[in-house]
Image: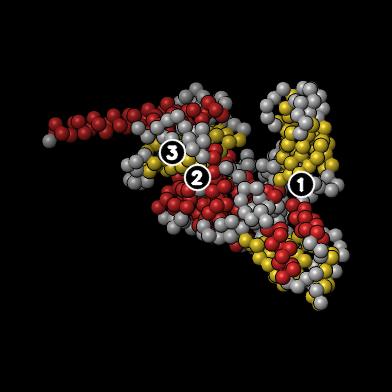
Amino acid sequence: MKRLLLPTFLFLFSVGLMAQSALADFVQNPLLKNANISLLVKDLKSNKSLYSYRANNSAVPASTMKLVTTATALEMFGPDFRFSTTLEMDGELKDGVLNGNLIIRGGGDPTLGSAKMGDQDFMNKWVEAVKSAGIKKVNGRIIANTSIFDQQVVNPRWIWEDMGNYYAPGIHGISYLDNTFRLYLRSGKAGTQTEVVRTEPEMAGMTFQNYVMSANIGSDNTYFYGEPFSATRTLFGEIPANKDEFAVKGDLPNPGLLLAQHFHAALLEAGFGISEFPLVDLFNTKVAKVIYTHQSAPLSEIITETNVKSNNHFAEYLFKYLATTKAIPATNKSAVSVIESFWRQRGLPVNQLFMNDGSGLSPNNGVSAAFFVNLLTYMRKESKYAEVFQKSLAVSGKSGTLTSFLAKSNLKGKVFAKSGTLAQVKSYAGYVETGSTTLAFAIIVNNPNGSSSEVVKKMEQFLIDISK
């Protein structure tokens, strides 16, 4: 009996040493030994924590925060949920003449006119809907109603450098064209000033203070600065030299108004009469007579785009829409309250969640590895939508933000996760499918003594080591 116990003890001891060695190699590496790290790996079959380092300490998560947003939306609304945008009319309709207004009532849909998904022919269907309602002339105007969300369209926890850029667009009650426009610049030889050529779409009255220079570079290094609803944008940075047209992207200052203008133009082209110019209604929550309802792509597709491509715009719309379950207009503060309440009721450590937005763009966010792993455990073991959630994640070496992650290792195709990147932040959270079991993991690193690419290599090696 004693002879059997000794080899077993030695085996377990050696396994324990290997586990400690993998963790020690990671956290004690000169690149990371001064960093703020939160790490946890859990075996979902045995429900045991295998590797833990400051697991309950919160750190800035960057885009891994999208896991919280998408999981909450999926649990609360289900994968088949669709956002609705309604066409409404007020006033009196008589003999084909509407003595009133046509209203586009925003429903928080991030996909309207999106290049990512959705019905690209929706405008023609809206025109046909107006025709089917018996309207030939409007003695009034097209009104874009954005009252579902409040008017704090830029999160106060975002940094000034981000505001005005396509990856941090304003979150209005109506989203249109991904709330993004393209500005085309012409560049000359390196070191010379660029010229503004045009915008796509055209935006009447928009002005640009352009300080972008031509440079011997191969990609866009331009930043927009500007406030929501303002028709002025300032540009700094560089673009490649000697380009007749080079596109840089900024956020639409007033997407609801642009949609109303485009709808107005489409109706005029189709032969309708409209007496007044379009405008935006920020506050009227009273619904008029609905003549048509436009629906988005299903939530399952929206969260997949959000997680696989790390779409900030979609994430922020999901985040703010969650607040509509509490009150309208939806606010950032209410969204946080809804999310915290939801996961507190399911036993997650929300005292380790410091959430300010839905995308992870804010450097004031904080989440622990323990919270992420608890969330991942719940979504795998208790959620009705476990399969939908996993399919919304990028796959190592194959898709989205994980296309190059672990691509040359034996974990290619076996890690389903969300990545996160900000200045001095790198994080991953998700699942490792080892064959015999599934690991839920979260690794958050803040302020390493090295580059993001160096940190990624250490994270890859850690995951490889613990999966042997």
Q: Which residue bears the numbered disc 1?
A: 201
Image x and y of residue 355, in percent = 59, 47
Whichever of callouts 2 and 3 sits on the residue coming sooner in the sequence is 2
Q: Is residue 324 left or right of residue 280?
A: left
User: Under tag 1, what secondary structure?
Assistant: loop
**Looking at the picture, does residue 51 appear above or below residue 318?**
above
Q: Which residue bears the numbered disc 3?
A: 413
Specify the amino acid type for callout 1. Answer: Pro
Q: Is residue 296 left or right of residue 410?
A: right
Residue 37 seen in the current view = no
Report crowding for label 1: few under 14, some 14 to 19, many 20 or more residues within 10 A (C-alpha).
few
Residue 278 seen in the current view = yes
Asked whether 376 or 232 is in front, the reply is 232
Q: Residue at x 73, y 37 (%)?
A: 248
Spatial CA distance of label 2 from label 3 is: 12 Å
Specify the amino acid type for callout 3. Answer: Gly
Spatial CA distance of label 3 from label 1 is: 39 Å
**Looking at the picture, does residue 139 appear above or below residue 297?**
below
Whichever of callouts 2 and 1 sits on the residue coming sooner in the sequence is 1
Specify the amino acid type for callout 2. Answer: Leu
**Which quarter of the rendering shows the N terminus?**
top left
The answer to which image quadrant residue 193 occupies is top right
Residue 393's tag is 2
**Which quarter of the rendering shows the C terminus?**
top left
